[in-house]
C-alpha cells in the first residue's frame, strides 16, 4: 500500500474484477449451449438493415429522438452516436435498433463500451414487440444491462401487461430492479495506520450531480475496534467509543445544500437514513473544526440512498478526505472510481441466461443476479439502444459525439 507523508491513500473497491478484457462464457453455457446466431458487425454500414430495424422518431420518456443516421457500422464495430441537434421537437438525437429476427430461451451476450458521459443510458435488452397480448405469458421487458457511465450496471424485469393507474393518475406496472456500481460502495470505514492530530478535517468531491452523504463519524484510537459502517446503531455499538464529529464544540461548514435546507445537521444525528443533500453543481465539500486538537484513528461515512429492495443508488464516484497539519492540507483517503472502473474505456460483456424457469444475469461471465421466471415466455427481438436521461447525471454538452460501441451480439441455444 502506498504511503504519502505518513498517511495511507486508500482506494476502496466493492468488487475485484478480473483484469482480462474478454470474459469467458459461463460454465453452464459452455457445457449445455451452442452458438446459433451472432452479429460481429464486420460489414459495410448499409448491410446493417438486413438484420436490424431502427427507430426513426421522438421518444417522450427520454431527452432524445433516435434515428438510423445515428447508428453507424465502421471498422468492425457498431456505434450508437449521441448528437446535440434539434430534431422532432427534442434537443438531442441518438440511436436505437432491434433485430428483425425474434428469439426465445437461450443465452444472450453482448460486448460493448459505454458512451463516455453521464446522463447516458447504454442498453442491451429484450422486449416483446407489438401492442397485443403475446401467445404465452405477459408483454415483458428484460434489461440485461442499462449501463450508466462510468461504472453502473442495471438489470430490470418489467411486466408491461398488468398496468394500473394510481390515485394521482400515474401509470404503474410490476417491475424489479437490481443495480451494481462497480468500484464504489455505500459505506466507507477508513482506519488510519498512523493516527493524526489536528483541529480540522475536510471532505471533498467533484461528483458532477447532487448526491446524498449520510452519517459522518470521526473516532479516536480504539485498538482497531470500530463499528460496522452500515450499522443503524453505530454510535452505540462500541462501549465508550465516541463520535468526535458529533461533539458540541464542532463547527461544520459546507459548500451548500439542496434548496438551502441546512441538511448538514443530518450528518451527525445518529440516523443513517437522514442525509446531507448537496447543492446541484460545483465542487462539494464539508469541513469539521474542533476547538482543541483531536487524535483520529478512524473515519467513517455513508453515501447514496437505499431503495426498498436493498439496492444503493447515486453512489459518489470520487472523494478526498484531508486533515490540516501546520497550515497544509494532507491526504488521508482518496477514491476515484473512474481511474479503475471506466466502462467507456474498456469492453465488457453482459449476458442473460433465460429459460422457462429462471432469468440469470451475467457480467464478464460471472453471475450477478438470479430470478424466477414468472411471465417471460414469448419470443422477442434483441435491442441495442442509447438514450439521454436526466436521472443518470447532469445533461451537459460533453455528451455530444459520445457513442456506445458494440463489438458483437451472440445468441446460444441449448444443445
Image (tube, rainbow, N blue to C red):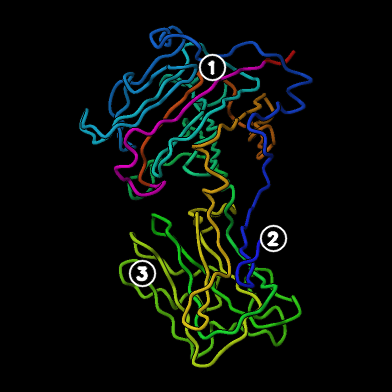
Q: Element at badge 1?
A: loop
* Nearest the eye: 403 or 309: 403
Q: Residues within 10 Å of mark 1 (few under 14, many from 20)?
A: few
Residue, x 76% and y 79% (percent of image)? 223
Q: Residues within 10 Å of mark 2 (few under 14, many from 20)?
A: few
- The CA distance from mark 2 to mark 3 is 35 Å
Q: Position of residue 122 (x, y in %)?
A: 46, 34
Kindly report which numbered mark, 3 or 1, lies closer to the viewer in this rendering.
3
Q: Which residue is mark 2?
A: 1
Q: Residue at x 68, y 32 (%)?
A: 365
| Number of marks | 3
Which residue appears at 40% of the width and 39% of the height?
A: 120
Q: Nearer the viewer, mark 2 or mark 1?
A: 2
Q: Earlier in the sequence, mark 2 or mark 1?
A: 2
The residue segment tinted magenta is: 391-412
**Alpha-carbon distance for marks 2 and 1?**
59 Å
Secondary structure, mark 2, is loop
* Residue assigned mark 3: 257
The residue identified by callout 1 is 135
Question: Magenta stretch containing residue 403, yes or no?
Answer: yes
Q: Earlier in the sequence, mark 2 or mark 3?
A: 2
Up-down relation of residue 75 to residue 283 (above or below): above
The image quadrant where one finds the C terminus is: top right
Residue 64, disc: none
Mark sitting earlier along the chain (3/1):
1
Amino acid at each position: 500500500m502506498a504511503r504519502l507523508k505518513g498517511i495511507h491513500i486508500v482506494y476502496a473497491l466493492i468488487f475485484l474484477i478480473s483484469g482480462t478484457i474478454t470474459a469467458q462464457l459461463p460454465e453452464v453455457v459452455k457445457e449445455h449451449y451452442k452458438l446459433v446466431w451472432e452479429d460481429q458487425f464486420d460489414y459495410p454500414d448499409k448491410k446493417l438493415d438486413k438484420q436490424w430495424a431502427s427507430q426513426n422518431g421522438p421518444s417522450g420518456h427520454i431527452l432524445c429522438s433516435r434515428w438510423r443516421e445515428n447508428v453507424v457500422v465502421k471498422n468492425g464495430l457498431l456505434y450508437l452516436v449521441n448528437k446535440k441537434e434539434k430534431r422532432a421537437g427534442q434537443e438531442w438525437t441518438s440511436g436505437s435498433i432491434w433485430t428483425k429476427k425474434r428469439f426465445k430461451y437461450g443465452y444472450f451476450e453482448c460486448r460493448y463500451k459505454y458512451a463516455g458521459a453521464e446522463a447516458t443510458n447504454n442498453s442491451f435488452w429484450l422486449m416483446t414487440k407489438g401492442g397485443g397480448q403475446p401467445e404465452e405469458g405477459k408483454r415483458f421487458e428484460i434489461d440485461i444491462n442499462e449501463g450508466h457511465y462510468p461504472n453502473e450496471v442495471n438489470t430490470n424485469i418489467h411486466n408491461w401487461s398488468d398496468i394500473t393507474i394510481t390515485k394521482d393518475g400515474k401509470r404503474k406496472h410490476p417491475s424489479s430492479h437490481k443495480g451494481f456500481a462497480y468500484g464504489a460502495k455505500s459505506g466507507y470505514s477508513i482506519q488510519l495506520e498512523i493516527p493524526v492530530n489536528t483541529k480540522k478535517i475536510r471532505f471533498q468531491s467533484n461528483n458532477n450531480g447532487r448526491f446524498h452523504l449520510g452519517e459522518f463519524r470521526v473516532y479516536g484510537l480504539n485498538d482497531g475496534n470500530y463499528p460496522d459502517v452500515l450499522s443503524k446503531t453505530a454510535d452505540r455499538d462500541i462501549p465508550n467509543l465516541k463520535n468526535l464529529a458529533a461533539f458540541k464544540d464542532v463547527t461544520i461548514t459546507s459548500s451548500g445544500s439542496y434548496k438551502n435546507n441546512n441538511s448538514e445537521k443530518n450528518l451527525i444525528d445518529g440516523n443513517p437514513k437522514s442525509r446531507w443533500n448537496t447543492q446541484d453543481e460545483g465542487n462539494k465539500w464539508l469541513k469539521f473544526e474542533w476547538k482543541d486538537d483531536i487524535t483520529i484513528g478512524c473515519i467513517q461515512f455513508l453515501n447514496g440512498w437505499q431503495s426498498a429492495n436493498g439496492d444503493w443508488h447515486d453512489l459518489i464516484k470520487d472523494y478526498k478526505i484531508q486533515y490540516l497539519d501546520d497550515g497544509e492540507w494532507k491526504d488521508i483517503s482518496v477514491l476515484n472510481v473512474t481511474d479503475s472502473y471506466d466502462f467507456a474505456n474498456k469492453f465488457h460483456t453482459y449476458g442473460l441466461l433465460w429459460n422457462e424457469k429462471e432469468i440469470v444475469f451475467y457480467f464478464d461471465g460471472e453471475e450477478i443476479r438470479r430470478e424466477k421466471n414468472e411471465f417471460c415466455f414469448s419470443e422477442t427481438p434483441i435491442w441495442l439502444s442509447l438514450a439521454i436521461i436526466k436521472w443518470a447525471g447532469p445533461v451537459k454538452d460533453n455528451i455530444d459525439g459520445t457513442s456506445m460501441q458494440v463489438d458483437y451480439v451472440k445468441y446460444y441455444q441449448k444443445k
